[in-house]
Amino acid sequence: MTDAPVLYWTRRDFRLSDNPALVAACDSGAPVIPVFICDEVVETHGAAPKWRLGLGAEAFGAALQGAGSRLIYRRGPALEVLRALIAETGATAVHWNRLYDPDSRQRDEGVKSGLKADGIDAHSHAGHILFEPWTVETGTGGFYKVYTPFWKAVRGRDPGPALSAPKIPAAKTWPESDTPSDWGLGKAMRRGADIVHPHLAIGEEAARGRLGAFMSNGIDAYVTARDDLATNGTSHLSENLTYGEISARACWWAGQRAMDEGKAGAETFLKEIVWRDFAYHLVYHTPRITSGNWREEWDAFPWTEDERRAEVKAWKQGRTGMQIVDAAMREMYVTGRMHNRARMLVASYLTKHLMCHWKIGLDWFEECLVDWDPASNAMGWQWSAGSGPDATPYFRVFNPETQAEKFDKHGRYRRRWLAEITSQPPDTATSYFEAIPESWGMTADDAYPSAPIVSAAEGRKRALAAYENRDF
């Protein structure tokens, strides 16, 4: 061992096991100082993801302490903070796991070039997804734009073994650390934090527990149960994958074991893990997907971008009068998550029935979802709107009423989240009124809208007319 330490910069990899950057830092033979920075990218996050990121970082700090190490918390521009820590500690190298969204890439490229100019070794590692975006190519050498060929290209690949948690060489002296609770990362959540918090599963241990429970009790029925809105039929791992509390590779190998055991839903689960990879594949190769129409011809489509419209307010508040849409929006305010089938329905209703730009929904989800992921969020919204790669055709307009009949046949999901439609609403439904901004002035005693602001038939007719008259 040498006395000069190395820094391990954690961002969205709050785990000890299968953490390539942490392993590489430990393999260097030098003392390792882990650091989390509330940096220029973190500061741009919406209320729920910023709050949840802070909780994840604190949980990871506790895990590191249990492993004989600690996590140093600092706030400020990433390169400035790292340079300051290097000056304080004499560190000779910095290790981190790569991220692929445009904001993170811009930050990381600046950090790497700045550190190298200072004579510091800067090492980025693969660890956030299964396969690096530039390693999956079509037969002609380009990137994939359609999911099914992408899946076929990687389904037989070996992503490598999941790495064991390393023994972390402790530093002899530690730099000063901020107290993350002083940063106020949950300030914008206001009273909603108390409502959402019980629905979270924070940290690596909780994530591994979720995966184990799903593999034992949920994966066999996953093919059909994952679309049943009233059934707990999904893994809920999106929250933990977002913050790297479990690796995609750990989920992949668990799914492969389930395949070997003949579990019926195993392949479908693996496809969902790869769908996440596909979203990052597209974000890396076409970063415009996070902020503009992936199909640029859709720039001429007559969506409204006016967020002040009454219809947008009703959509955000779960007051459209379309029960399945409103139930989904309220689930998000109470739990910080939304059922994947429901995400498609609320996205379709906003972009097609209400003719609003998908960016309105994209931004609102970033504000409200604890499992917000820059690639999956962009891919999901553009898929639903019809403007993205491998998208659902714009003329495929989900009918919320028939979707409710198909995926919530007995109305259990709607009653779970809509207090106004039942005489004895459950806590899940009434909690919504405790979570939302007081400025909305809503109570469980309010009458539910007597009719949808835009009916299923009217919305479909309007959307198809706009599509047929499009100027491209």
Image: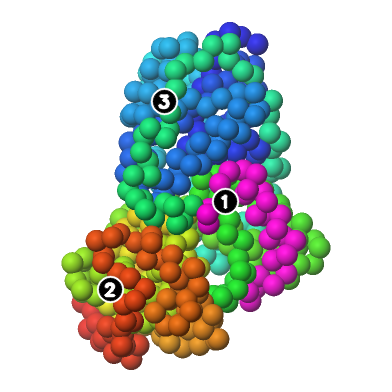
Identify the mark nearer the N-term, 2 or 1: 1
Colour scheme of this structure image? Answer: rainbow
Identify the mark nearer the N-term, 1 or 3: 3
Quadrant of residue 386 in the image? bottom left
Q: Which residue is mark 2?
A: 314
* Residue 254 spot, x, y in % from top left: 71, 54
- Do labels 1 and 3 touch, CB within 8 Å? no
* Residue 297 spot, x, y in % from top left: 27, 68
User: Is residue 121 located in the magenta-colored stretch of the structure?
Assistant: no
Q: Which residue is mark 1?
A: 201
What's the magenta region?
198-225
Quadrant of residue 161 in the image? top right
The residue shown at (55%, 15%) is 5
Q: Nearer the viewer, residue 140 or 90?
A: 90
Q: Which mark is residue 178?
A: 3
Q: Residue furthest right?
A: 261
* Residue 92 spot, x, y in % from top left: 50, 14
Q: Secondary structure of the magenta portion, mostly?
A: helix
The residue shown at (54%, 11%) is 173
